[in-house]
Amino acid sequence: MRRLTGILAAAVVLRMAFHALYLPAYEGPDEPQHLARVLAFARKPIGEALAGRWVDANVVGSVLSYPCPHPEHGCRPYPGSRAAFNLLRAAPPRPERPVDRIPNREVQQPPLFYAAVGLGLRAIGAGENPAATLLAVRLFNVMLVALALFGPLRPLFRDSPGVARAGLVALLTPGACQAFARCSNDAAIFLWASFVLVALDRRLPGAAMAVLLALGPLLKLTALPVSAYAVGVLLSQKRTRAAVAGAIASVASLPLRGIHAWGLAVGPEILAGRSGISESAGEWIRGIARSAYGVVRAPFWAGGWHNFRAPSVLVALYASLLGGTMLAARRLRSRRLLPLAAGVLVAIAGTIAYGVSIRRSHGVWGGLAAWYVWGWAPWLAAAGSDLVVIDRRFVRVLFAAECLFVFAANAWWFAVAGAVYAG
C-alpha cells in the first residue's frame, strides 16, 4: 500500500505535466494576465512591476497569434488549428496589425509569486518570449506540486494512508490540473499550505511560524482560511503568543495597495464609481448562494477559456460520491474542530466578499472559480482526517467509486476538449 501511494503521487505529477503540455497556449483561465505579472518582474523596473496594471502589447500579440475560442478578438478560431500541444511547436507569426496593451484584471493579486518567478527569469536572462515563458511557468507550477507531494505532505500523511490515497486520486482530475498546471499563483498556495501543516505538526518556533503565515497572503489571499486554521491550531496547542503573532502576520499585508479582501477578481479601478446593489434580502441570499455553489459545484472539472461545462451526469455522480462519503463518516473528534471551523468561516466570508465584488463590477451573481478549493486541499485533508474516520466497511467501496469517477471525468473531458483542440 505504501508503494501504491508513491505510484499515485508520481501519476499526479505526470498527469499534470501532460496537462501543461497538452493545453493550448493561453487556454488556461486568466493565463495572459498572470503571465503579464510574471513578465513585468522579468523585464521592468520593480515599482512598475509591483503596480502590475497592464498586459503589455507583446503578450497581447502573442495571445492573438494563437487560436482562441473568441475569434472576434482577432485571433484564429480553433477548428483546423491543431491547437493541442501547440506550445511545443514554433510560435506562429504575430498579427500584422498593431496591438495595444490592455488593463490587467489580476492587478489586485499579491506580488510574491510573480516576483519570485519573474526575478528568477531576469537572473538567467529569460522571459523574452511570452509563449515559452507561459510553458515554463506551467511546468514550474507542476514542480511546486511535486515538491509538496514528495516533501512536506509525504511524512504528514504517513499515519493516514487512506486519506493520502484518496487525495492523490482526486488530484488526478482535470479540475486539479486546471488549478495547478497553468500559469497562475494557485500551485504556490498548495505548497505553502503543505509547509504550514508540517510547521504545525513539528511545532515550529513562534517567530518562524509568523514569517511562514505572513508569506501566504502575499502569494494569494485564498491563503487566509489556512492561516485562520493555523492560528486556531496554535491556540489549541496552548501557544498563545505564537497564535497572536501568526494572526497579526497573516493580515499585515492587507493594507498594501492593490490587495483587497479575498484577492478580488476585479480591481479598485473597476469598482470605483459603482453604485450599491439595490436588491431585496431574498435576492441577496439567492445571489450569495449562487456564488457559493460555483465554488463547490465542480472542482473536478476544467473549463478553460472555452468554459466547457461539466456534464450534469458527472455533477450528479460527484454529489453522490460526496454524499456517500459523508454518510460513511464516523466518530467526530474535537481536537481540531474549532480550528477547522475558523478556517471554514473565513472561507465563507471570503466567498461572500468575492461574490459581492463580482455583482458590483459585472452586474451578475456567480462567476466564482471552483479551482480555489484545490489550494486548500492539504489543510482540508489534514483537518478532515483528524476530525472524522470512514467506517471500515465502506473504505474500499468508496475508494473504488472515486477511482471510477476520476477515470470517467478524465475520459469525458478529453473527449470534449480533444474534439476542439485537435480539430
Image (spheres, rainbow, N blue to C red):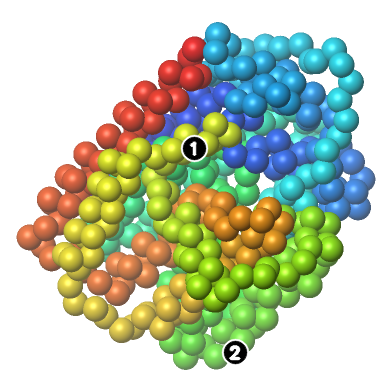
Q: Number of marks in the image?
A: 2
Which quadrant of the view contains residue 300? top left
The residue lying at 68 percent from left, 75 percent from top is 251
The residue lying at 48 percent from left, 60 percent from top is 290
**What amino acid type is highlighted by mark number 1?**
Gly
Label 1 belongs to which residue?
303
How packed is label 1: few (under 14 Cα within 10 Å), some, or many (20 or more)?
A: some
Query: Marks 2 and 1: in contact by CB < 8 Å?
Result: no
Label 2 belongs to which residue?
241
Residue at the extreme top of the image, as rendered: 80
**What amino acid type is highlighted by mark number 2?**
Arg
Mark 1 element type: loop
* Disc number for residue 157: none
Residue 30: x and y in percent read 65, 41
Is residue 41 depicted above or below 277 in this figure?
Answer: above
The residue lying at 50 percent from left, 73 percent from top is 282
Residue 122: x and y in percent read 81, 37
First-in-chain label (1 vs 2)? 2
Q: Is residue 81 left or right of residue 363?
A: left
Residue 183: x and y in percent read 62, 39
Q: Is residue 139 visible?
A: no
Q: Is residue 121 visible?
A: yes
Residue 321: x and y in percent read 23, 53
Foreground disc of the pair 1, 2: 1
Nearest the viewer among 95 and 111 is 95
Is residue 120 depicted above or below 160 in this figure?
Answer: above
